[in-house]
Amino acid sequence: MTTKNTFTTKSSNITVPLPLFIPVYRPDYSFELFSEDSRKYGLSAVMVNAFLLFRERRLKAAFEQGHTLRNHIGGFDGMLCTDSGAFQQLSGRKVGVDPLEIVKFQNMIKTDIAAPLDLITPPDTGFDETRRRMIISQYRIAEALEVCDYSDLAGIQQGGGFFSLRQKHIRQLAGIGIKYYGIGSMVPFFNKNHDLSFTCGVIRDARSVIGEGAPMHVYGAGDPLDIAFMFFAGANIFDSSSYAHYAQRGYYMTPYGAVNKRSACERLGFECACPVCRDNEPAGIFDIIPGEPLRKLHNLFLILETVRALGEFSGNTRIEEYVSVVYDRHIENIDLFPGSMLASSWEKYLKGDKSDKEAETGKAMRFIDPDTEGGGDDFCCFGQFRDKTGIPSIEKPSLPHLKGLDADNCGREPKTIELSEIEQEAIEVLAAESAVVYKMDRSVIAALLAEELTAPKNTRFRSRINGAESIKEAQRLSEYKTFRKNMRAVLYQKLRQYKEPDLSANELLAGFVECAGSDIASTVDSLLRTHVSTRERMPDREEFARTVHGFIKPGDAVIDVGCGFAPLLWPAGFFENLSCYIAVDKDAEATETVRVFAKKCGITNLKAFTWDINSGLPELNRLTGIDRYDIALMLKLIPVVSRADQASGGAAGATSILGDFPAARLLATVNRESMTKRESIEKRELSVLKQFIRAFDFSIEAGFSGGSETGYCIVKKLTQQSNIW
């Protein structure tokens, strides 16, 4: 239930006042949060990073046994909010968490407000990529709503710097029944420089859509000056760890802006009545500025007091008076706040100027470098992220000549590679040699060679071959031989990548979410060609599907271990009459894609889960709710896992899990041909598979031969004898 001045959580029935500030809780600096003074000043909620809890196995196990988030942080009786790892994902780290699983986890630990794993959009992201992120975020939010039976789910608006996308997304969120709204990806637009025109314009538009009473949470907003203007525009919930980050960088918060010098405090004439400043009388605030722990406490109390005061002003003209005073004091002392854009941006907001990237294409948005300007979790990532804004094609381009070629520009501005005659000849010779050995088109190899040749590290090599009178003379140079050796390593590594690195995963997934009708088939084909394992099966796709299906009986419970995109290979009738088809993979992008496929095609018995073999069978059972299967598909998996175990020190941990897998039959296949080179590896791979069969006491029930794969359907000898299945 929500009124204009309060919000009550769905399950815990906790009521908090609005407006509300939610400080970010971390054990290493948040011990002050639960003090008596904090509660007195209005601490009613905290934000905890659920992703950090999720990845700690010991903690995760405790939560699965009934431990709750409230227990974990010491019994705090206010509203508990969690986030999902979206900022960690943006920083460039692959978080390795399933978007649906992290929401289920938040619901399980009984957070009051759960967050989806939305895709944050840095301000320099182009329109097409921003739109894709919005589409995927909306899909994840809608999917997450279905599993949040305890927690309220935050429907977080995305849309980057494009007002039209922001408008569209907030209306989509309202249309699916969201009760708790968030405004995401806003921090770099306003942080530190107080550029509030776009942010407040988005808030005002969102408020007009969701109505007066709904909670609206601006994620990452923690400067008391910004909070006042955002509240005036229509937001009423804010969260940040700014109170700590500002203190770490020497900043002391005031309602008029953060300062780091005693003289600045004197000029602003701010007298603070918080417990920290009060207890340090008569010296007052001027003697506590150098001390980080006290600054941290002061900053927290000031934010809480600012929000409390704003609540008192709500609904009358005093809020306008308060904002005017803050504005005037800030502008009168503008030299204390270098780079502040408050005056110009607030004027734009009042005039109704959107100031978005559609109105000013290519506008360079200022971001905060956490290492130089007092940033932290709330400010991090944006300066380190550079996204591709173009739309790469799925097929590699044809490259009939070398001048002007650009093999992998992936939406970047095309670059012309100027090569001398002997350089072109050298590349043609090397490409022809490599195409005989490696499973890559000659023209693509030539493009990669040309790009590598023009890299600064190869300046000496270029100089040396251009001094040669013929290609034969150039081939005798030690630099030529070194370049040839290095390029073969580059080609090998490129072919070892399971998924095409030049393709935008967001582009493919967003296109899949949006496609309908006859477009589904072509989108599936495009997706299959981006993953090397399924791409290898495309020429014999129908035959391969029939062969695999021949080992599956009506009513079987099937699990596809290390599925990748394999479920997308099967025709619609493949899943009919199966008890279930469980697809598991450690790649969260793959399992999310399979779930989208199942929903698009209406395949209700196809379920996908993100599972790493090394996490063990109990974790698999927890995820799926199934403890035994009729058949497990381990397509091209066992040799890969076996080699990974050997590389990690010889222990057969993951291989043992496959050997003890709870399935009556295993359909285990191997590649006939190398993933990288044009050579047969069938004998070597079958040898690994046969060793697995002997080591774990299997027997061969039938042989398998389909397309580029061969293998066996195997059963445990004990199973054959006792027929316990």
Image: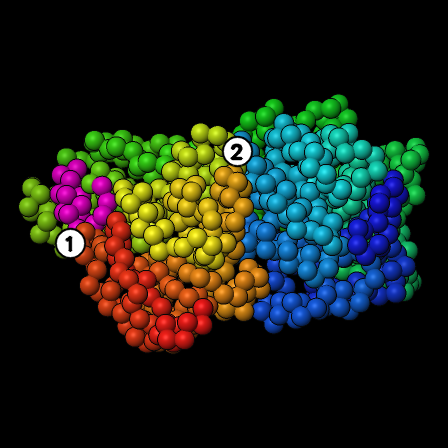
Secondary structure found at label 1? helix
Where does the image place residue 312, in percent across and percent down from the top left?
92, 43
Where does the image place residue 97, in percent across and percent down from the top left?
54, 56
Q: Is residue 519 above or below residue 104?
A: above
The magenta stretch is 422-441
In the picture, which quadrant includes the N terminus? top right
The residue that label 1 is drawn on is 481
Left or right of residue 498: residue 1: right
Dot 1: within a 10 Å radius of its alpha carbon, few (fewer than 14), some, or many (20 or more) residues? few
**Where on the picture, by quarter, is residue 232?**
top right
Q: Which mark is residue 48?
A: none
Which residue sits at x=72%, y=38%? 177
Left or right of residue 433: residue 657: right
Report, in whole angstroms, how far the alpha carbon at label 1 lies from the one at label 2: 49 Å
In-front residue for pair 652/219: 652
Left or right of residue 254: residue 619: left
Q: Earlier in the sequence, mark 1 or mark 2?
A: 1
In reply to whether residue 355 is colored magenta, the answer given is: no
**Which coloring applies here?**
rainbow
Tell me the kind of residue under disc 1.
Lys
In-front residue for pair 682/294: 682
